[in-house]
Amino acid sequence: MSKQTVNYKNLANKIIDIIGDNNVESVTHCETRLRFIVKDRKKIDDNSIQNLSGVKGVFFGSGQYQVIVGTGVVNHVYEEIEKSKRVNAIYGNDNAQDTEDMSMQPLGRRIMAMLAGIFIPIVPVIAATGLFLGLKSTFTNAEILKIFGTTPAAIPSSLITVTSVLTDTVFAFLPALLVWSTFKYFKGTPIIGIVLGIMLVSPILPNAYSVANGSAKAIMLFNSIPVIGSQGSVLTALVAGFLGAKLELFFRKHMPNVLEQILTPFLTLLVTFSIMILGVGPIVHSVENILVSLVQSLIHLPFGIGGFLIGALYPLMVVVGIHQMMIAIETSLLAATHLNPLITLEAMYGFANLGVALAIFLRAKSQNAKENCASAMASQLFGVSEPTIFGVLIRYNMRPLFVTVFTSGLGAAVLGIFNVAANTYGLAVLPSYLMYIYNFRCLIIYTIVSILTIVVAFILTNMFAIPKDVLVDDDSASKKNKIEVKDEVIAAPVSAETIELKEVSDPVFSSEMMGKGVAFKAPESGIVNIYAPAAGKLSVVAKTGHAYGIKTNQGAEILIHLGLNTVSLNGEGFQVKVKEGESIEKGQLLGRMDVGVIRSKCLDPTIIMVITNTDDYTKIESNDKNKVEHGEEILSVQKRNCQIFCVNRFFS
């Protein structure tokens, strides 16, 4: 969906309305999605959010409620959330993730959220380095240079040296970046973290790569403890960052104010560096080497079995949000072998996604489905898979996801059999070919298999996984609800004093964003009965009892909203006497509201009634009475001189 067709402010407010202001602990975002830490996931109506124009899908994973809106759009929507100040927007603060918000989550989710919080800030520079490596491989490749009548020997050594600054810096100082990011995540001082990280890869210490290939020897501290740099050791950096941040917080808490500014950094660096050098570092590095060996053993299982398992499981890891942990393993593989076969196997799911989305795009009659697929494919071409995963694969049913899982595994199995490996990571789908230019054989095999993966996914989707929903055009779906609206008189649903809508302390209603209407002042306490303002059918009955949607027999779509932000009460203080889909008569009791309960929770009990299909009428007027009894005329609506299509609106 283009920027021009998305009202970012409206979308931001509607998302918060559904999730609930009081249900949000904090919100941040990444490249494609809003990430909410919520108090109660069960209070959120997924369908209501997913049906909002501009939302591609929703998912709960890694302890976060994630709303996928796509690249570019997410920044604008998040900006409106920040401006509204309705919830705690933490992106860009010193702490990218509020770890306290996760304290009540299961351990597994907390670990995955931690890895995401640490690695996401450094992924852009890793991807940039991967692109630099691909470009360097291109202009130094003998086969490529042969086309231009030259050889690698003709390239000036000075140029190679200068370009090495672009390609080697991030990997040489990766532990420093990781310690910095870990400090930031655990609320330490980032500058202390980056200094500690630089110490771990100091040129004074023997380089870990040189020690590994035998060109250098470790320093034997006290003639017994081997000391080397931590180049490429991801696990060492994570442990150092966690330990250092916790020590810093401890020292700051117990240090006298007069000494805190100097002694806290001093003791944090001294103690953490000493612990890492004197034993923890080598032990952690040994554990890391064992993990790398296990991963390599899995990758090289015979007949491509390991490749199939990795390729098939990776899309599911993305769905549940635990794929960030693979970056740590890939980094360790690169440090140990200078090659990364893992990303090669993982990458096939991006091509499988393209085949699935392309098949649905070509078969879909729904314009909305076509737009979703088109934008998803555009993002997927450059490795951003969330719009495809959540906006296409699992939006309609699970069959498209099954096709991706199987096809991704199949492509990865073939690549595993041929031992294809990348020379970096951080690139996916279209840019990923740059990771194989260093080896012409790998490039050819990877290209053929990736194209075949798209083709197989395309065929299987057409055969087994085209969602029925996309085969109906939008106009046909709308015609099912075609109604000719008529002039109508709407009665008051309660006995109360009236309030102009603009006086309601909720911008969604006061701005008439939801439609024109009227509000009613609730008493200080007691039970308020809510009656049907017209005859018709209940299109919505909120499970929490705080809202009713009515489509009248004359075509008006009415929303009765009981209190502001009362969805957070999860039904407390409300009684529902009807069911969704039920036909009702004017004056029928819909439910009851306990004003005392609402006020005890410091919430506003104002009752609001709006005509959500306001655009279908030329005039909507309320009477001038300051107080009405339920059943009295309160609104009159006058139709337009044409037929309209009544489309279900959002009921908060």
Image (cartoon, rainbow, N blue to C red):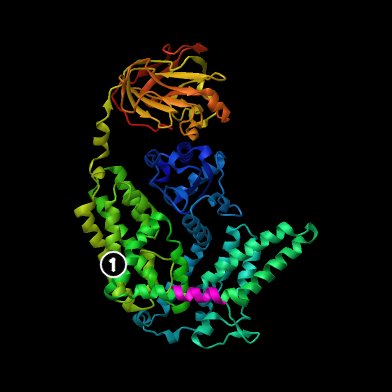
Question: Of the residues shown, which amino acid type is indicated by label 1?
Answer: Gly
Residue at 63 percent of width and 61 percent of height: 246
Q: Answer yes or no: is residue 584 visible.
A: yes
| On screen, residue 20 above or below 198 | above
Q: Secondary structure at mark 1?
A: helix
Q: Answer yes or no: is residue 604 visible.
A: no
Q: Which residue is mark 1?
A: 411
* 233 part of magenta stretch: no
Nearer to the camera, 75 or 523:
523
Quadrant of the snapshot with the C terminus: top left
| On screen, residue 550 above or below 361 | above
Q: Quadrant of residue 533?
A: top left
Residue at 43 percent of width and 28 percent of height: 545
Residue at 31 percent of width and 52 percent of height: 393
| On screen, residue 224 above or below 92 | below
Spot the residue most to the left.
Answer: 463
Q: Position of residue 344 (x, y in %)?
A: 36, 69
